[in-house]
Amino acid sequence: MVDWLSLLPWNKIFTAACGCFLSDSNYIHLMESNLDALQKTMEELKNGRDDLLARVSIEEDKGLQRLALVNGWLSRVQIVESEFKDLLEAMSIETGRLCLFGYCSEDCISSYNYGGKVMKNLEEVKELLSKKNFEVVAQKIIPKAEKKHIQTTVGLDTMVGIAWESLIDDEIRTLGLYGMGGIGKTTLLESLNNKFVELESEFDVVIWVVVSKDFQLEGIQDQILGRLRPDKEWERETESKKASLINNNLKRKKFVLLLDDLWSEVDLIKIGVPPPSRENGSKIVFTTRSKEVCKHMKADKQIKVDCLSPDEAWELFRLTVGDIILRSHQDIPALARIVAAKCHGLPLALNVIGKAMVCKETVQEWRHAINVLNSPGHKFPGMEERILPILKFSYDSLKNGEIKLCFLYCSLFPEDFEIEKDKLIEYWICEGYINPNRYEDGGTNQGYDIIGLLVRAHLLIECELTDKVKMHDVIREMALWINSDFGNQQETICVKSGAHVRLIPNDISWEIVRQMSLISTQVEKIACSPNCPNLSTLLLPYNKLVDISVGFFLFMPKLVVLDLSTNWSLIELPEEISNLGSLQYLNLSLTGIKSLPVGLKKLRKLIYLNLEFTNVLESLVGIATTLPNLQVLKLFYSLFCVDDIIMEELQRLKHLKILTATIEDAMILERVQGVDRLASSIRGLCLRNMSAPRVILNSVALGGLQQLGIVSCNISEIEIDWLSKERRDHRSTSSPGFKQLASITVIGLVGPRDLSWLLFAQNLKDIQVQYSPTIEEIINKQKGMSITKVHRDIVVPFGKLESLHLYQLAELTEICWNYQTLPNLRESYVNYCPKLLEDIANFPKLKG
């Protein structure tokens, strides 16, 4: 008997007994009330879960992906619900054991444990209930790969197959594609990229990065993060922080990194890219001209990209020229085969020369082309001797010397640099290459005509958004080769770029240099005083300039173009700038310039002055007297605003043709629109810090408006007036609105609920709307239909839109009541617009 008693768990019995009568958490006494509360609370939780699942289902139907946070909450609910069901099954037994009015139990240990589980389950259910309200339940899925637009892959199909088989081989983690410039490496890489779009692959993301010769690690990081994090919240982070963000993102993914145009080894670890391995299954593919780079990058396999075979080359050339030309004379096909053979199977040469021959319909023209291609060439460093003379044929085919000068000028920009068309044309005008008249049929139109001609000749490439162009790197090398008199006078042109350039190079032949470009370097101080009797162009934008020495501008008598833009730390210019007596173009936009030097008044030939985005420049008083010959004055988004005094100054600039301005007073805006010559010159207009019940924009007075910004304004209504002064008494219904307005930016606008007046800008290419809390619709249906009913020429908007950015618009519910396909939309970004989710789902081109 004693032995049997000793086996009893007296400590547990004692604890349970105390729990029955003494504990504050009397699980036995509270069992029934807790069970009742648990059942009610669990019912609430299940309803909340069902509501959340319904929301998630709607979002997933739109192509969004549920958040991991939501998944975690649902998983916890499932676990808690399973525990609840177990408690329910035992409930009748445990409640049947209760005695002494529920204060005790026939089996205290069992009832105590059961009551404890009920209490724990109840607390967990309450906690989950408190966290059931998710503001956002799903997000836009970043597409695995973004399709590249390729004109043709003629001759590369076999190579694409070989590269793809290598890429999907489990033993190959890093693949190097190497070959000479213009051979088609980029097209091959684009083809591999597009295979990931077309095929269902197991990779999470495919990232395309352009590296180029003068790459900077941060530039590569920005391209990677732009693909991984469309929220852009990483933009102001340091290089090391960006590396951390990239690493944290990619180490959770099976990724493919496509690096185009490596000239040297890239430290991927420093960038933040985890090394590809069998464990993570990731891949890296790169293109390069150098086999040595393949070794330095430790490529598991190297594939040489060769020139096309004679048959492949002929097929590409035939498709480029077109059968109509080839059939125009019986002798032309044989001559065309000779021309194609002169291209030595180089796809770039075949394309460029083929484009140059598309209008040659006579035998004599084809024979002349063969004679030109037979002329001796010159060696250019880094290029095969035979290629540049071949590419030069397209240059030789340009109509006249002015167009050739315009083309060669483009070589002053760094490799892969995207050149703004308007800026390029202004350079050309001031250099005297094209008509200085900026009115219709003048220099601006002529400039665009030349750009179009160079694009069609494959000497320039149209960028993704069509207000910029760039040069293929091989074409650029050819242009530099020609610019240097075929390598005989390299000193006359100085082009340096990249992070390694921290000082003005000391090997410059200042006495003979004609054009100098130091774009996108790390130069901070200029301390020299060179003698430059022939220098006409000096390009120094996108640097870190802090100080320019007193003597730098002393001996540059022929300098015509000076670009110092995008040097935020540059706060002053030396007074000796007055020595630049030939200067016509001065760009100080995006600098920290506080005041203009007194010496500026001696620059009587200055016709172009850009002060846009100068956030600390305070005064322009006296500019009409100082610079009476100004034709272009740009003040868009500068601290300096147009007021009564400046209005008078601007009216005294008798040669003014192009003006961009910032205005803060609604009355000043009205007065500006009332002065015909002034209003008609406006190309860019920024309304900032303006407070008014109504603002009227006259589309006749502002007929040349191309860019409009509305920033930090409180305006209840924006109204468009399409009547001229002469037609005030009758309404004109013929093509009202802004014909040239291409870009609109609205930031921090308070007041209006919609922007339906955008219907009067039918040629918009870019719309950005941010931080505007009252805007509910971009185009209101009722207002829109009313406008289109009166004006038959106005149709549903955005047919020409290329870029759409919507950010932090809490009340935005709709963009437009009747979407068209937006055939030209190339870039879109929609974020923090919670009420717009349905519209985004209905319109697949919009990216959240």
Image (cartoon, rainbow, N blue to C red):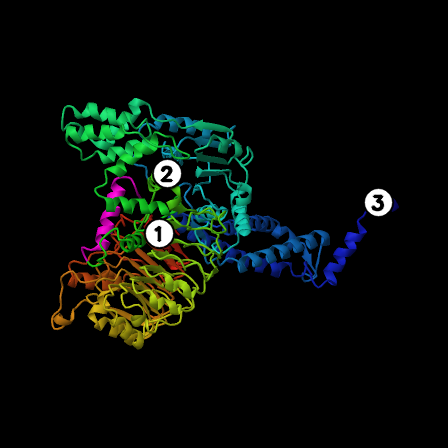
The range drawn in magenta is 440-462
Q: Position of residue 184 (x, y in %)?
A: 36, 32
Residue assigned mark 1: 534
Amino acid on which disc 1 is placed: Asn
Q: Position of residue 833 (x, y in %)?
A: 39, 58
Q: Nearer the viewer, residue 43 or 392?
A: 392
Residue at figure coordinates x 42%, y 28% from the top left: 163
The reply to whether residue 452 is visible in this rendering is: no
Against 137, is 633 above or below? below
Q: How many marks?
A: 3
Depth-wise, is mark 2 or mark 3 nearer the camera?
2
Against 208, is 657 above or below? below
Residue at figure coordinates x 51%, y 40% from the top left: 266
Amino acid on which disc 3 is placed: Trp
SS label for mark 2: loop
Residue assigned mark 2: 488
Amino acid on which disc 2 is placed: Asn
SS label for mark 3: helix
Q: Quadrant of residue 391?
A: top left
Is the stretch drawn in magenta largely helix, strand or loop?
Answer: helix
